[in-house]
Image (spheres, rainbow, N blue to C red):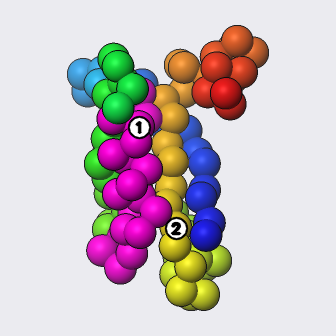
Amino acid sequence: MILAIHSFTPRLKGRPPRPWQVGVLYSHLDARLSKPLIARLRTEPDLCVGDNEPYSGRDGHGYSIKAHAEAQGLAHGLLEIRQDLIATDAGQAEWAD
């Protein structure tokens, strides 16, 4: 399996703040990793989890997924963490845990 980890901006182009703390992206080809990961993350209290948000894996996001996972038939997902939550050492440590 391959799990890519990226971050996303709290706001995009003057739009309202994004509500998700974390999102899981995947394509229509394979949700073996992503769907269980979303379900597990949603068991955490007060955590807003995006299912193909803030972007959609179906729209071509996630180069590493296409190039390294889909091409090999590997289970895969792309985890996106909101940047303001990992802007400090403490925030990074919390998400790493």
Relative placement, left or right, of 53 versus 6 is left
Q: Nearer the viewer, residue 12 or 1?
A: 1
Q: Closer to the camera, 14 or 43?
A: 43
Where residue 82 appears, as percent x and y from the top left, is 48, 29
Mark 2: which amino acid? His
Magenta span contains residue 36: yes
Q: Residue furthest right?
A: 89
Q: Nearer the viewer, residue 26 or 61?
A: 26
- Quadrant containing the C terminus is top right
What residue is pinned by disc 2? 76
Tell me the quadrant of the picture where the N terminus can be found: bottom right
Q: Is residue 64 magenta?
A: no
The numbered mark at residue 1 is: none
For residue 39, side relative to residue 95 (left or right): left
How many numbered discs sit on the rendered protein?
A: 2
> Is residue 72 visible in the rendered structure shown here?
yes
- Label 2: few (<14), some (14–19) or many (≥20) C-alpha neighbours in 10 Å: many
The answer to whether residue 20 is seen in the rendering is: no
Residues rendered magenta in the picture: 21-42
Which of the two discs, 2 and 1, sits closer to the camera?
1
According to the image, label 1 marks what residue? 41
What element does badge 2 sit on?
strand
Which corner quadrant of the image does residue 68 belong to?
Answer: bottom right
Q: Earlier in the sequence, mark 2 or mark 1?
A: 1
Amino acid at pointer 1: Leu
Residue at the limit of the structure toward the left, as seen here? 16
The image shows residue 15 at horizontal and vertical percentages of: 26, 27
Position in image of residue 95 (x %, y %): 61, 27
Q: Secondary structure at mark 1?
A: helix
Alpha-carbon neighbours of circle 1 within 10 Å: few (<14), some, or many (≥20)? Answer: some
The percent position of residue 44, horizontal first and vertical second, equals 39, 26
